[in-house]
Image (spheres, coloured by chain):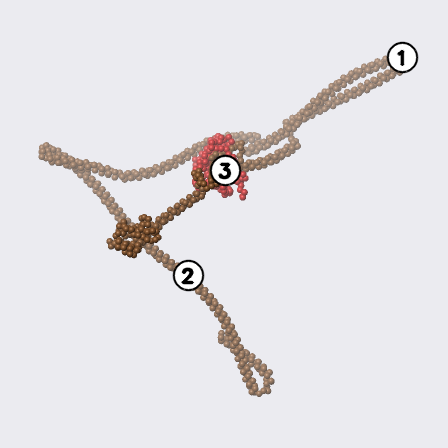
Chain colours: A brown, B red
């Protein structure tokens, strides 16, 4: 770096020098003419000056360059310093970090060390444990060994016992053999006894013969008796042995028998269970059978019924076939029935309509009949009238005839008069009369015609009435026919009637629906009421147990309230009396308050306090005992308070139980002045008493001396 | 097994229904906390573990009522049994557990047993008791001290026995009703429901 920088500086100086060279050249060239005329010295000096100047410039440039360099250097230095500082900073930070890390690591190491120590401790503990465990294992091994040895011992004992057993068996066998030998001996003895008897006989014979041999015979007799006794014993023994033998022989048999019986027993139990199961099964089966039989009977009955029903069905089917209706199934039948019912209903409806129309028609007919009757009566009246009129007509005709005859007579008379008095004065009179008569006649004739007209009229009327009657009869016939037809056949109900009926039906239907809804609502309400517990008092009544829990609780409550009220009253009275009497003592006997909550609380508190006291006492007792034993162990004296302000000290090393020291406190214990009272033991210690108590006036020293003395005495012994 | 084969008689039905009431009433008393829970003991019935009271007074009362009820069930004269829960402070009826009993009176004339499976009846009873237990979830809490009473709705012509007396229906003012399940022994049909006082806060 430095070299390179040096090079560049050189390079730059060169350049600057060249520059410098070139510049003075130009100045020279310009100055040339100015100074051309001057001499060489001058030129030389000039040149020297120039050179000096150049040198100066050069040095100056050098200086400049150096300064520049220096600046650069400084800059670089600064940069370097900054960089260094940075680096230092970084390194310091790194260092710090490192230090931190180091500390961390240190702490970690410490922790690890601690842990290690702990682990070491644990390890040591573990090792100890292991050791202990090893110990225990060893102990266990030992125990096991012991056990093994015991076992072997036990085995040995077992084998020994077995051996013993074997020996005993052998002994038994030997005994048995002995027994047999004894029996043999017995037999031999028996034989011997027989021999003896023979001998005895001989001896008796000899006795008889030889009295000297009597003595020996008596001896032999005694011997014989003894032997006989022995024999009896032997026999008994042999019997016992035999029995034993037989029993022994029977034992395996018995065992076998027992086994067999047990097996048999088990088998029998099994069989019993089986049999009970079978019994149950049989019971079940019997029941089943019964049921089955019942079912069978039922089946038979059902079959019979079925046959009957089949027959019936066939009959029905036949009917169906015969009637030509398509009845194959009950549904068909029911459908048919429904159809028929519907038809019947239709018919009934028609019938009803017809009967109603019939009734109306009947009514009409009755009306018409009455009308007919009226008409008939009318006709009869008319006939009567006509007859009357006929009669009248006849009379009138007769009268007309009479009148014509009269008129003819009158005319004849008049003519006769005319003839007699032909053209006399009377004639006008007569003619007048005649005219009058003729007028009258004409009047009569007119009247007659009138009457005739009336008659004819009446006749006509009668005819019309008759016609009317006939018509009415015809109508009646028609009506009768109608009625008959109505009754006979299905007359088509009139559409009006149907319409009206339909309307009515619709109205009724709507009303029915309305009523149904109402009914539903009412039922719902009823249900609700029912749910709420309502009931119909006509049909139902509600009862309950008189002593039910509610009434009991209520009663209790009432009683409680009553009690409280009474108490309140009592308290009030008391208060009043207290107020009246002031602070006078009241009669407590009349007043008894049941234990209130407060009292109960206080009692509880008291109980707990007592309990506490008790516990404290126990603790104190314990502590005192502890303290006393501690005192006893530490000082070697057992201190008892026998009387008020009097203390008895008994040393550990006392030779006798009665050896004790008595101290009495003068005044309060706190003052610390104590006096030794004389006892049998203290009398033996006069020296120490003189020394320690009278001289040194120290009870502890005295006690220590006594202790040491007693201790030394004990250890010497 | 034998009972299923034999079917059910009027007597058996009455016993069954009375037994159901005994357990049902105990369940209600336990569930509704009318009596302290420590006075109840656990027993197994209908394959359910149920609570039965050990309070001697209550036991005595219940046995009295149930035995009488059994007679009436046998006579088919009982229509309803109602467990009324009353608040002791206000004497207000808070709950009514109503069991409607429909007796088939023809069973009195014909003594022939009906075909009915004991298992099925017990199944039905079990579901009724389960539902009684489940109703606690929606019934309002009984916050005050309460006592209960048993009302029996009988036919009008029934002679009131000694120790019994007539009572009112003890209805609830403004109640909500919930119908519960029912069961039938084919002679007695028991349908249950509960009515409870509507709370203002609800």
* Nearer to me, A325 or B123: B123
Q: Residues at badges 1 and 3 in contact (C-beta under 8 Å)? A: no
Select label 2 or label 1 by which is in front.
Answer: 2
Q: What residue is pinned by disc 1?
A: A421
Mark 2 → mark 1, Cα distance in angstroms: 214 Å
* Nearer to me, B79 or A698: A698
- Using the image, name the chain to which the residue with label 1 belongs: A
Q: What residue is pinned by disc 3?
A: B84
Question: Mark 2 vs mark 1: which is more N-terminal?
Answer: 2
* Nearer to me, A444 or A468: A444
The answer to whether residue B52 is seen in the rendering is: no
Residue A478 lies, with reference to residue A649, above or below; the image says above
Mark 1 → mark 3, Cα distance in angstroms: 150 Å
Report whether B124 appears left or right of A190.
Answer: right
What residue lies at 74% left-to-right and 19% top-to-bottom? A384
Select label 1 or label 3 by which is in front.
Answer: 3
| Helix, strand or loop under label 2 | helix
Q: What residue is pinned by disc 2?
A: A108
Q: Are marks 2 and 3 on the same chain?
A: no
Query: Is the residue marked by circle 3 packed among few (<14), some (14-19), or many (20+) residues within 10 Å?
Result: many
């Amino acid at each position: 770096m430095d070299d390179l920088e040096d090079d560049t500086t050189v390079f730059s100086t060169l350049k600057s020098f060249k520059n410098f060279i070139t510049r003075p050249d130009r100045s020279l060239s310009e100055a040339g003419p100015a100074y051309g005329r001057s001499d060489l010295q001058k030129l030389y000096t000039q040149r020297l000056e120039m050179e000096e100047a150049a040198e100066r410039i050069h040095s100056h440039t050098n200086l400049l360059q150096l300064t520049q360099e220096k600046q650069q250097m400084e800059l670089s230095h600064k940069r370097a310093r900054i960089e260094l500082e940075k680096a230092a900073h970084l390194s310091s930070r790194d260092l710090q970090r490192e230090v931190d890390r180091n500390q961390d690591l240190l702490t970690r190491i410490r922790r690890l060390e601690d842990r290690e120590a702990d682990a070491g401790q644990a390890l040591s503990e573990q090792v100890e444990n292991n050791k202990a465990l090893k110990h225990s294992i060893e102990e266990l091994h030992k125990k096991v060994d012991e056990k093994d040895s015991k076992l072997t011992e036990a085995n040995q004992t077992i084998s020994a016992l077995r051996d013993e057993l074997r020996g005993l068996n052998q002994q038994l066998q030997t005994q048995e053999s002995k027994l047999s030998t004894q029996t043999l001996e017995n037999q031999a003895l028996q034989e011997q006894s027989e021999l003896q008897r023979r001998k005895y006989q001989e001896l008796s014979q000899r006795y008889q013969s030889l009295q000297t041999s009597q003595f020996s015979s008596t001896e032999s007799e005694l011997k014989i008796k003894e032997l006989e006794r022995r024999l009896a014993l032997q026999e008994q023994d042999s019997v016992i042995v035999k029995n034993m033998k037989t029993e022994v022989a029977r034992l395996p048999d018995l065992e076998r028998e027992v086994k067999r019986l047990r097996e048999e027993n088990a088998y029998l139990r099994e069989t019993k269970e089986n049999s009970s199961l079978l019994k149950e099964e049989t019971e079940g089966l019997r029941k089943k059978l019964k049921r089955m039989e019942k079912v069978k009977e039922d089946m038979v009955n059902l079959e019979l019924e079925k046959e009957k029903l089949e027959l019936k069905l066939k009959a029905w089917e036949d009917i169906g076939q015969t009637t030509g209706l398509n009845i194959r199934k009950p549904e068909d039948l029911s459908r048919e029935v429904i159809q028929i019912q519907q038809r019947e209903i239709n018919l009934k409806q028609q019938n009803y309509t017809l009967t109603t129309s019939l009734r109306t028609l009947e009514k009409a007919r009755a009306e018409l009949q009455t009308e007919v009757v009226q008409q008939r009566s009318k006709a009869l009246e008319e006939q009567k009238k006509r007859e009357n009129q006929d009669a009248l007509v006849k009379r009138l005709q007769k009268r007309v005839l009479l009148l014509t005859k009269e008129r003819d007579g009158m005319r004849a008379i008049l003519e006769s008069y005319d003839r007699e008095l032909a053209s006399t004065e009377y004639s006008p009179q007569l003619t007048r009369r005649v005219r009058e008569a003729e007028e009258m006649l004409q009047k009569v004739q007119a009247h007659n015609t009138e009457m005739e007209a009336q008659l004819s009229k009446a006749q006509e009327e009668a005819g019309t009435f008759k016609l009317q009657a006939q018509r009415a009869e015809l109508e009646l016939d028609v009506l009768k026919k109608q009625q008959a037809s109505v009754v006979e056949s299905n007359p088509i109900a009139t559409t009006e009637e149907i319409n009206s009926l339909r309307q009515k039906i619709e109205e009724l239907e709507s009303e029915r629906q309305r009523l149904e809804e109402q009914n539903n609502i009412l039922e719902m309400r009823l249900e609700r009421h029912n749910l709420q517990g309502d009931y119909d008092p006509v049909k139902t009544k509600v009862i309950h147990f008189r002593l039910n829990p509610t009434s009991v609780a209520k009663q209790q409550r009432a009683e409680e309230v009553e009690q409280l009220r009474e108490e309140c009253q009592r308290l009030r009275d008391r208060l009043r009396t207290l107020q009246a009497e002031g602070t006078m003592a009241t009669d407590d006997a009349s007043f008894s308050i049941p234990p209130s909550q407060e009292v109960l609380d206080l009692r509880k508190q008291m109980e707990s306090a007592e309990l506490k006291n008790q516990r404290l006492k126990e603790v104190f007792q314990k502590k005192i005992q502890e303290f006393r034993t501690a005192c006893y162990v530490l000082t070697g004296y057992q201190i008892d308070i026998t009387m008020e302000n009097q203390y008895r000290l008994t040393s550990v090393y006392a030779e006798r139980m009665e050896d004790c020291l008595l101290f009495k406190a003068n005044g309060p214990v706190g003052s610390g002045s104590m006096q030794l009272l004389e006892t049998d033991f203290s009398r033996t210690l006069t020296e120490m008493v003189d020394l320690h108590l009278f001289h040194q006036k120290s009870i502890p020293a005295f006690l220590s001396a006594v202790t040491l003395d007693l201790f030394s005495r004990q250890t010497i012994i | 097994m034998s009972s299923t084969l034999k079917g059910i008689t009027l007597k058996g039905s009455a016993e069954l229904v009375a037994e159901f009431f005994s357990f049902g009433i105990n369940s209600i008393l336990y569930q509704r906390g009318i009596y302290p829970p420590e006075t109840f003991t656990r027993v197994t019935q209908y394959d359910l573990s149920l609570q039965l009271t050990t309070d001697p007074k209550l036991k005595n009362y219940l046995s009295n009522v149930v035995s009488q009820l059994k007679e009436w069930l046998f006579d088919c004269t009982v229509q309803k049994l109602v467990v009324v829960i009353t608040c002791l402070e206000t004497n207000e009826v808070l709950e009514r557990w109503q069991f409607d009993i429909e007796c088939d009176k023809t069973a009195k004339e014909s003594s022939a047993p009906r075909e009915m499976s004991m298992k099925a009846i017990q199944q039905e009873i079990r579901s009724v008791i389960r539902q009684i237990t489940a109703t606690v979830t929606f019934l309002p809490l009984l916050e005050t001290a309460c006592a209960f009473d048993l009302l029996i709705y009988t036919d009008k012509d029934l002679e009131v026995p000694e120790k019994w007396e007539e009572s009112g229906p003890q209805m609830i003012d403004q109640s909500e009703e919930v119908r519960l399940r029912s069961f039938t022994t084919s002679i007695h049909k028991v349908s249950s429901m509960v009515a409870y006082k509507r709370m203002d806060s609800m």
